[in-house]
Image (cartoon, rainbow, N blue to C red):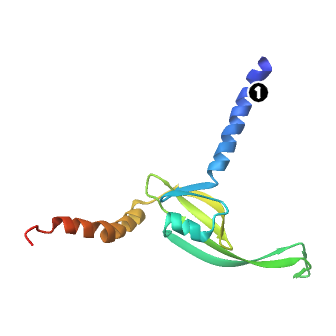
Amino acid sequence: MIRVLLLLPALLLGSALFDSADAAALFRCGGGIVSKSTSLERVAEICGEPDEASRRTEVRRSGGEWRDGRYWGGSTRVVHVETWVFDLGPRRLVQALTFENGSLVRIESRGYGSSRARDAARWSRRQWTVMPRVAERLRPLSD
């Protein structure tokens, strides 16, 4: 019985750590959830445009060694890396999604977002989607 009582906190702590690691592999946005290995196109479909985006190309080497200032043997490959940042407002964490060759490989949480970035995006969307409907309702009925 004492062994079980001593083992129980360790099991609970382990399960809590496991759950938080799984949560970092998911990102809820727009109308759905994206996870690692989701394509860049699918993320754009679900989440829409990012607040910031950056692109770079990396050359990665494996299986060789550096000798006399040169890389000998092994193989090299070109990886296209794209990072999308979603600022979801001041009450949620900023999420950075990293894609390699068009596939989501990492989801990182950064600090809390800013209200200005999301409000500006909301206003521009509202201006084109909500405002015409409101204007229609406000039109005089005497036409």
Please tell me which residue lies in front, 136 or 14. Answer: 136
Residue under the point 77% across and 22% down: 4
Residue 89, quarter of the rendered image: bottom left
Q: Quadrant of the N terminus?
A: top right
Work out whether residue 104 or residue 96 is closer to the camera in this orientation and state it.
104
Is residue 56 depicted above or below 16 in this figure? Answer: below
Please name the residue that numbered disc 1 is placed on: 7
Q: Quadrant of residue 72?
A: bottom right
> Badge 1, how many Cα within 10 Å: few under 14, some, many 20+?
few
User: In the rendered image of this protein, does residue 74 appear above or below residue 84?
Assistant: below
Which residue is located at x 66 percent, y 39 percent?
A: 16
Residue at the left extreme of this rendering: 142
> Residue sitting at 66 percent across and 60 percent down?
36
Answer above or below: position of 139 versus 94. Answer: below
Q: Amino acid at mark 1?
A: Leu
Q: Quadrant of the C terminus?
A: bottom left
Q: Position of residue 118 (x, y in %)?
A: 41, 63
Residue 128 in the image: state x and y as whole percent.
32, 71
Q: Which quarter of the picture shows residue 76?
A: bottom right
Count of numbered labels shown in the rendering: 1
Q: Nearer the viewer, residue 40 or 54?
A: 40
Indicate the secondary structure of the residue bearing disc 1.
helix
Q: Is residue 79 left or right of residue 127?
A: right
Q: Residue 27, image x and y in percent?
A: 57, 56
| Residue in the image at 21% along x and 68% along y | 136
Residue 38: x percent and y percent? 63, 64
